[in-house]
């Protein structure tokens, strides 16, 4: 049941950053043209070879390489078998989580999977909280937190990845997965015991169809096309045999082939009449009672909650159990937008799990009221927050000004007071514990130290950039196109108190260096709109992490979709391109544009002797990271770690850099023991 | 007064003076009036009571009033920004100019930021989170970020009073003018204005405020006041209209007309003063309602961009339920202020209602 689609990652990121439905934008995307609908019109014409001739050409090129087909629960079980048990369940339940040691004990004891089926209460119900109502059940159109949550439970998928972001094919749906030696083809043999919720078999044709739907210009899909664009074609040779044809052999192909899947027999005929997938009567009906392929199906949804029930046909086939049975009979997502209400619900036992705000973790969950029914645990998470400077404005086009902003900000006050000392400082786009961080493992560069406020440095940089207080009003100004312009800008931020507070701290800090900053809280749909249309000067926001560093290209590549700040750097563009390639295809350092710029090479501290060598994948991303840090398109602030409160009945929770659910097994590993 | 009355035995003491006498007899209403007066004093002198900027200081050969920056940011002399003094006057003034001196507010705390370690008399900084219980240093405790609640409340008084006066002031001017015109001229004008009033009543103020805040680049509390005022005059207009309809039938108006006075004089000199009594009552209630609306917006976390609004404190309390001081103090302040205005309104009603003339309130 690891149906989390890798290509959806960045979308999830955006949801984290702005936290609301993308519906409005999607609707605006629907093309109004009267042209006839053509399935897969975005694809270049391509005639797939027959399976025999494909096999022949692959064998001529070195044959197939087997790729892992795994069960993430088994993986987790194996990992846990190697880990020492730090406490018994009863000890852990009595603990109060006030130190790293206690946290480790709680996770060690309560994060375990059940020893055997008899331990599990398969009739259990888990109730969780979610911030907004479910607007859409179609996995292709998912855009809000709730929609991703639901589609991860109801959706069908072939691939997953674990907590280390190692990709694999899911044993639940795949028999074998092979990649050709030249990296141009992926061949998947699907299992034959897969059923949609209406009893129709799930076949390779569904995957081919879904791919073509994603690649149709009239279907309003924004989230998924980024990855699938790199695929030349997907061909179902029979019900089980599926081949992905790639344009190029790329490291990222393993993520690109992971997209959402919809049933062909349901949408095949109706798509031409209504490519929006939401407007026609038939599609409205399918939206209310969708045909799904995951372990759960929605049985009730309204403005208060979404109720999902375990689907028999997802693990039973012809009267036999063919897959692991999901641990819960019912999953209930209650819509509770306010976090203080969520905490009260958790303490009252109305919900079983929630993520805690820093002040809730440090202040509101230490007493008997909380520990009577609940416990809590935390883990590192790679979700970073930042001030984002629009380079397309007279203020922030100069990197010196952006650097000045970083120096002017009081990072210590933010970490100590606003984040209660619970979070790590963020020093760029990749996490310090990742392989892509400069100077870590075998990556080039040197480790970047967190910044401490330095007003003198900030003032000096602003002076150098030509922003001076010429009229003695206390604020800096500069002649722009012959007109004097005061350094006063507005930062937009989602209307959430802890975010606004940080922007106000920035505004206070900037006053000291003669810069006026106004804070403008916006409701999240408006904020998203402004970001996408680049109608802002500065913004506060955040990104979660993709499973692969290449997903960041979407944020930093010139002209890319989520490059809201209009950052342009040909070095970075080239490095992203190189990082995707297989190592043997990569250019040597000396042929990269970056090599001709001695400043940058010195900044990255790359040994000139490396000229003939090819950069590793890690090198590429570490160099990107360092280049970004040098240019400061963002002022990176902090990583928000994962803080969770759990009902004491709950077991099997584990953290990953993408939180407790954003990986395999994620949610599927949660369970409740039999009541004794 | 009695002597005064004897001297002018032939002249009546006048409607308003009489009303004032009757108003003074009502203890609750008087107490409320004193309370509002006190609030007004607090509002005016808030930077003197609590702040981190000197009330007056001598610095680099000049005299300055940095505390005025609490009223309007730009009134804090730019020299203090350029010299980087604004967040640490006590040390930086002496550091930059050993000859300088300053007179400080009674309590050294800031409504907009946390007082840091060693900022004042080498004392430690404000505590954060639930450690910020009310203490000698932080009379009403601190909020989640260590900002002093007492300072916020004192400076918030300004907003509470301003929003009441300004928005109701705007509403009164518009309301009286529209109502008077409708009542006085009657006929088609009355019909048109009455429909306009009805249309205005259909516009939901709250949604309008939301829309406005998202359009304006730099929304301030003044925008809020204008919106509340511009869309809150309908009640006053209707009452004024009714009064005008009634009064214009009276003989003294006919007499004035016969004397050849033009309509502006009739309207504003003759009828308006006599129609004010019933209108003043909804004005006072309007002030209370405006304060409540601003607090509501602050509580909901929308619209109130000011950091010191009482409602915003309540909102913080909602997120941190164990920090009771974030709810009790601002809650009490809002309650008492709104109650005071309502009592005053009721007092005025009692005092100006001729049918209650003989009552012994």
Image: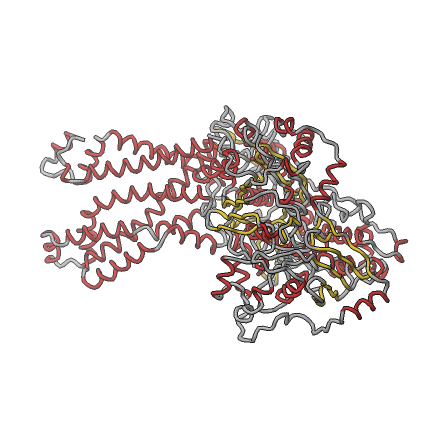
Q: Viewed as shown, does residue B204 lie left or right of B13?
A: right
Q: Position of residue A570 (x, y in %)?
A: 74, 61
Q: Viewed as shown, does residue B344 lie left or right of A180?
A: left
Q: Position of residue A626 (x, y in %)?
A: 75, 50
Q: Position of residue A503 (x, y in %)?
A: 57, 45
Quadrant in the rendering for residue B208: bottom left
- Please say if A89 is above or below B64: above
The count of marks equals 0
Q: Position of residue B361 (x, y in %)?
A: 18, 31
Scheme of image coloration = secondary structure
Residue closer to the observer: B83 or A250: A250
Q: Looking at the rendering, in which quadrant would you find the N terminus of chain B? A: top left
- Please say if A572 is above or below A212: above
| Direction front: furthest residue | A319
The answer to whether residue B287 of the structure is visible from this angle is yes
Question: Residue at coordinates 61% horizontally, 41% vertically from top-left?
Answer: B83
| Direction top: furthest residue | B136
Residue closer to the observer: A532 or B12: A532
- Please say if A557 is above or below A42: above
Residue closer to the observer: A258 or B190: A258
- Please say if A245 is above or below B66: below
The answer to whether residue A15 of the structure is visible from this angle is no
| Direction bottom: furthest residue | A35
Question: Residue at coordinates 54% horizontally, 37% vertically from top-left?
Answer: B113
Quadrant in the rendering for residue B23: top left
Q: Viewed as shown, does residue B317 lie left or right of A185?
A: left
């Amino acid at each position: 049941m690891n149906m989390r689609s890798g290509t959806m990652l960045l979308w999830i990121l955006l949801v984290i950053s702005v936290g609301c439905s993308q519906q409005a934008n999607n609707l605006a995307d629907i093309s109004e043209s009267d042209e006839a609908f053509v399935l897969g019109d975005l694809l270049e014409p391509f005639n797939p070879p027959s399976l025999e001739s494909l096999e022949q050409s692959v064998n001529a090129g070195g044959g197939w390489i087997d790729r892992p087909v795994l069960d993430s629960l088994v993986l987790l079980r194996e990992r846990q078998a190697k880990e020492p048990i730090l406490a018994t369940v009863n000890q852990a339940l009595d603990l109060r989580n006030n130190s790293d040691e206690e946290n480790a004990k709680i996770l060690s004891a309560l994060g375990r999977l059940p020893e055997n089926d008899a331990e599990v209460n398969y009739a259990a119900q888990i109730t969780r909280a979610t911030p907004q109502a479910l607007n859409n059940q179609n996995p292709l159109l998912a855009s809000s937190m709730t929609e991703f949550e639901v589609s991860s439970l109801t959706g069908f998928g072939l691939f997953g990845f674990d907590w280390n972001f190692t990709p694999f094919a899911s044993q639940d749906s795949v028999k074998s997965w092979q990649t050709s030696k030249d990296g141009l083809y992926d061949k998947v043999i699907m299992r034959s015991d897969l059923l949609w919720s209406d009893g129709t078999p799930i076949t390779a044709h569904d995957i081919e169809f879904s791919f073509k739907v994603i690649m149709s210009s009239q279907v309003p899909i924004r989230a998924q096309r980024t990855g699938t664009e790199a695929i030349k074609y997907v061909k179902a040779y029979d019900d089980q045999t599926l081949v992905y044809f790639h344009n190029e052999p790329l490291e990222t192909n393993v993520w690109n082939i992971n997209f959402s899947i919809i049933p062909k027999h349901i949408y095949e005929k109706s798509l031409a009449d209504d490519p929006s997938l939401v407007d026609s009567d038939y599609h409205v009906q399918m939206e209310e009672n969708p045909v799904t392929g995951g372990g759960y199906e929605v049985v009730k949804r309204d403005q208060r909650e979404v109720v999902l029930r375990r689907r028999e046909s997802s693990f039973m086939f012809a009267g036999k159990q063919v897959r692991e049975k999901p641990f819960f009979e019912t999953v209930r997502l209650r819509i509770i937008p306010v976090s203080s209400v969520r905490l009260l619900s958790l303490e009252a036992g109305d919900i079983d799990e929630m993520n805690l705000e820093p002040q809730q973790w440090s202040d509101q969950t230490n007493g008997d009221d909380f520990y009577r029914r609940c416990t809590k645990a935390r883990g590192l998470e790679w979700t970073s927050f930042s001030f984002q400077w629009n380079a397309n404005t007279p203020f922030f086009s100069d990197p010196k000004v952006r650097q000045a902003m970083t120096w002017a900000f009081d990072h210590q006050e933010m970490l100590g007071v606003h984040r209660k000392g619970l979070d790590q400082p963020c020093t760029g786009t990749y996490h310090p514990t990742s392989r892509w961080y400069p100077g870590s493992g075998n990556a080039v560069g040197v480790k970047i130290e967190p910044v401490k406020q330095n007003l003198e440095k900030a003032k000096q940089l602003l002076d150098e950039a030509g922003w001076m207080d010429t009229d003695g009003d206390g604020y800096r100004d500069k002649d722009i196109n012959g007109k004097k312009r005061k350094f006063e800008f507005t930062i937009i931020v989602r209307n959430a108190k802890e975010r606004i507070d940080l922007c106000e701290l920035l505004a206070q800090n900037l006053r000291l260096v003669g810069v006026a900053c106004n804070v403008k809280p916006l409701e999240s749909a408006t904020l998203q709109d402004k970001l996408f249309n680049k109608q802002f000067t500065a913004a506060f926001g955040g990104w979660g992490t993709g499973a692969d560093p290449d997903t960041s290209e979407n944020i930093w590549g010139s002209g890319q979709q989520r490059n809201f700040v209009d950052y342009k750097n040909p070095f970075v563009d080239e490095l992203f391109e190189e990082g995707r390639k297989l190592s043997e295809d990569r250019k040597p350092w000396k042929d990269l544009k970056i090599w001709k710029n001695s400043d940058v090479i010195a900044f990255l501290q790359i040994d000139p002797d490396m000229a003939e060598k090819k950069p590793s994948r890690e090198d590429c991303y570490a160099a990107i990271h360092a280049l970004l840090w040098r240019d400061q398109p963002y002022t990176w602030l902090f990583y928000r770690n994962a803080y969770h409160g759990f009902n004491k009945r709950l077991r099997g929770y584990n953290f990953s850099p993408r939180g407790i659910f954003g990986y395999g097994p994620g949610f599927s590993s949660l369970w409740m023991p039999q009541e004794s | 007064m009695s002597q005064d009355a004897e001297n002018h035995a032939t002249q009546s003491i006048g409607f308003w003076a009489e009303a004032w006498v009757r108003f003074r007899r009502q203890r609750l209403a008087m107490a409320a009036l004193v309370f509002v007066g006190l609030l007004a004093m607090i509002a005016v002198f808030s930077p003197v009571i609590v702040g981190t900027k000197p009330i007056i200081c001598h610095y680099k050969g000049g005299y300055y009033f940095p505390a005025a920056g609490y009223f309007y940011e730009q009134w804090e002399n730019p020299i203090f920004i350029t010299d980087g003094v604004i967040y640490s006057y006590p040390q930086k003034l002496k550091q930059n100019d050993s000859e300088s001196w300053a007179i400080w507010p009674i309590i050294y705390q800031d409504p907009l930021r946390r007082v840091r370690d060693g900022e004042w008399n080498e004392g430690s900084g404000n505590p954060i989170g639930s450690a910020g219980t009310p203490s000698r240093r932080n009379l009403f405790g601190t909020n989640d970020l260590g900002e002093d609640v007492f300072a916020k409340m004192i400076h918030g008084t300004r907003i509470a009073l301003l929003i009441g006066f300004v928005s109701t002031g705007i509403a009164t001017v518009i309301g009286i003018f529209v109502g008077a015109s409708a009542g006085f001229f009657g006929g088609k004008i009355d019909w048109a204005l009455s429909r306009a009033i009805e249309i205005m009543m259909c516009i939901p103020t709250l949604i309008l405020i939301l829309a406005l805040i998202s359009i304006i680049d730099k929304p301030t509390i003044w925008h809020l006041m204008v919106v509340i005022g511009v869309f809150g005059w309908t009640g006053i207009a209707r009452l004024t209209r009714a009064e005008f309809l009634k009064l214009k039938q009276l003989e003294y108006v006919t007499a004035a007309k016969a004397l050849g006075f033009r309509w502006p004089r009739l309207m504003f000199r003759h009828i308006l003063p006599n129609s004010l009594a019933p209108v003043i009552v909804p004005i006072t209630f309007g002030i209370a309602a405006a304060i409540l609306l601003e607090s509501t917006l602050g509580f909901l976390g929308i619209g109130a961009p000011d950091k010191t609004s009482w409602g915003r404190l309540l909102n913080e309390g909602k997120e941190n339920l164990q920090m009771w001081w974030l709810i009790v103090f601002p809650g009490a302040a809002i309650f008492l202020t709104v109650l005071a205005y309502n009592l005053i309104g009721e007092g005025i009603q009692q005092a100006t209602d001729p049918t209650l003339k003989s009552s012994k309130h």
